[in-house]
Amino acid sequence: MTKRSMTKMLMLFSMSPFLLLACSSEESGAQDTLIFARGGDTVSLDPSEVTDGESENVAQSILETLTTFEEGGTATEPMLATE
């Protein structure tokens, strides 16, 4: 490695803690706030009108169905349905 590339790497490593601090907010210590990042906005909360993945994820999170698929398979099993 050349002296110039070593200097660049040293500068990058010495600046990285400051870059990480700049990305944090002042209220990062608050324990009562949940920040949930998603890829896009929800188009509809009506499961019959959902056409995108983000809306499907939200609809599935707030709606419990009578049946669900078994984990890792395609067989159905009861969720809210009881015998």
Image (cartoon, rainbow, N blue to C red):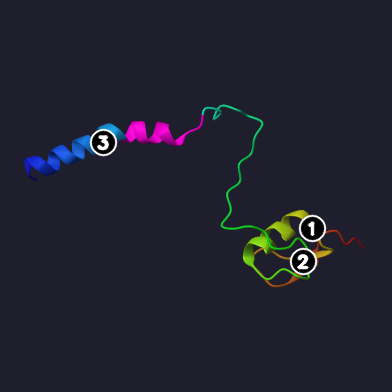
Name the mark on residue 63. 1
> Callout 3, which amino acid?
Phe
Q: Is residue 46 magenta?
A: no
> Callout 2, which amino acid?
Pro
Task: Give the residues drawn in magenta, as a range.
Answer: 16-25
Disc with the residue nearer the chain's start (2 vs 1): 2
Which residue does the numbered mark 3 point to in the structure image?
13
Which residue does the numbered mark 2 point to in the structure image?
47
Q: Residues within 10 Å of mark 1 (few under 14, many from 20)?
A: few
Q: Is residue 20 magenta?
A: yes
Residue 17: quarter of image: top left
**Compared to 28, does 59 lie above or below?**
below
Q: How far, Cα to Cα, is label 3 from label 2?
A: 48 Å
Report the side of 24 relative to 49 (left or right). left
Q: Position of residue 71 (x, y in %)?
A: 67, 63
Q: Residue furthest left?
A: 2
The residue at the point 69 percent across, 72 percent down is 74
